[in-house]
Amino acid sequence: MEERLESAWDKMIEQLGSWLDVIVVSLPNVILAIIVFAGSFFLSRYVNSLMLRLLAKSSMQGTVKKVSARLISVTVILAGLFLALGILNLNKVLTSLLAGAGVAGLAIGLALQGTIANTFSGIVLSFVDYIKMGDWIECNDYSGEVVDIDLRTVTIREKDNNMVSIPNKMVIENPLKNYSITSKTRISVSCGVAYDSDLEFVQELVIKTISEKFDSVKNKEEVIFFYTEFDNSSINFETRFWMNSTTGLQTAKAKGDAIIAIKKAFDANGITIPFPIRTIDFSNKLSIKNQKNSNEEDSQEGIVSEEKYGKE
């Protein structure tokens, strides 16, 4: 028994000695690998700060700038890790890490398809010119001012001060109207007048009212007026003009001001804006009278019958 213990002890000492020899031999590589990895870590922090300064001059969104700089810094750290593993002759470990990263990346990609799509859409939105912070847009049945663009959503503030977050993918794939790209917006107002109205006078009055109401209309020739149809109770028209506007709220307010001005002008000049009415024509009065008399006779006969039965 003692011999076996002594033999096991000797083997353990021999193994520890061999490990110590390996450590001593590999110590320079270990130190070098640690220095390389630590250097890559500090270098990544410097690269992150440098990229933030460089990207500050670009038109990219703030969130996208931070994420881009962070991705580059992480790439530097991964490069330092792979280089350190190569110095330690751990090529098999390096191969296993790459294979595992590939499988994990595939699984994560399948599980987060929507999130990844919104992320790439956010990166695309940071480089385009047709949408930026402060623009008034209309997209996916929502309209408002763009207050934030990140890697997941575009946030807009509506006219009623409510916040709406739209996924970046929906902004990229669906039509988008930007009121802030151009400095002018066309305003269209539709209305109707009674059939007995002087149509030429109505046209002149509307053009004069619009040109005097809005400073952006230089002269009467800039106001477009035309009649559109004979409706059930009115003759309808549409007037169009241009005004300086960069938001949907300004456009809606201008249209409201135009409606008020036209209504006041019509009231002052006795022009009627008709509303839908329905007229019932009782052309056959005799039939109605005969039917009324017949109903009365039937009622009298019923009374007589009741009296007769009562006497019996």
Image (tube, rainbow, N blue to C red):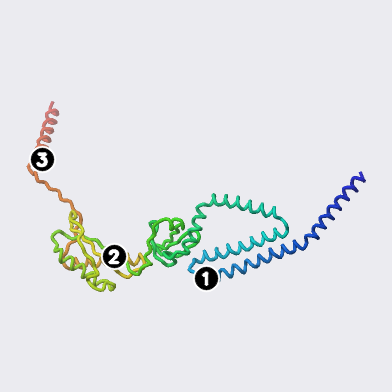
The residue at the point 69 percent across, 65 percent down is 38
Q: Which mark is residue 187?
A: 2
Drawn side of residue 276 relative to residue 92, left or right? left
Structural crowding at the residue carrying mark 3, measured as other residues with C-alpha within 10 Å and reported as few (<14), some (14–19) or many (≥20): few
Element type where label 2 sits in the image: strand
In the image, what residue occupies the spot 64% across and 61% down?
79
Q: Residues within 10 Å of mark 2 (few under 14, many from 20)?
A: some
Q: Residue at x 13, y 64 (%)?
A: 198
Which residue is at the front of the view, 42 or 216? 42
Which amino acid does the dot numbered 1 rest on? Ala
Image depth: mark 2 or mark 3 in front: 2
Element under label 1?
Answer: loop
Viewport quadrant of the N terminus: top right
Judge from the rendering whether residue 170 lies leftward or rightward of residue 283; answer left or right. right
Give the residue furthest to the top.
312
Estimate how packed mark 1 is, as few (under 14), some (14 to 19) or many (20 or more) residues with alpha carbons within 10 Å. some
Residue 124 versus residue 11 in the image, above or below? below
175 lies left or right of 23: left
Residue named by callout 1: 56
Tell me if residue 89 comes above or below residue 212 in the rendering.
above
User: The C terminus is located in which quarter?
Assistant: top left
Tell me the CA gap for discs 3 and 1: 90 Å
Instruction: Please give the residue where the numbered disc 3 appears in the rendered image.
Output: 292
Q: Residue furthest right?
A: 2
In which quarter of the view is residue 173 placed? bottom left
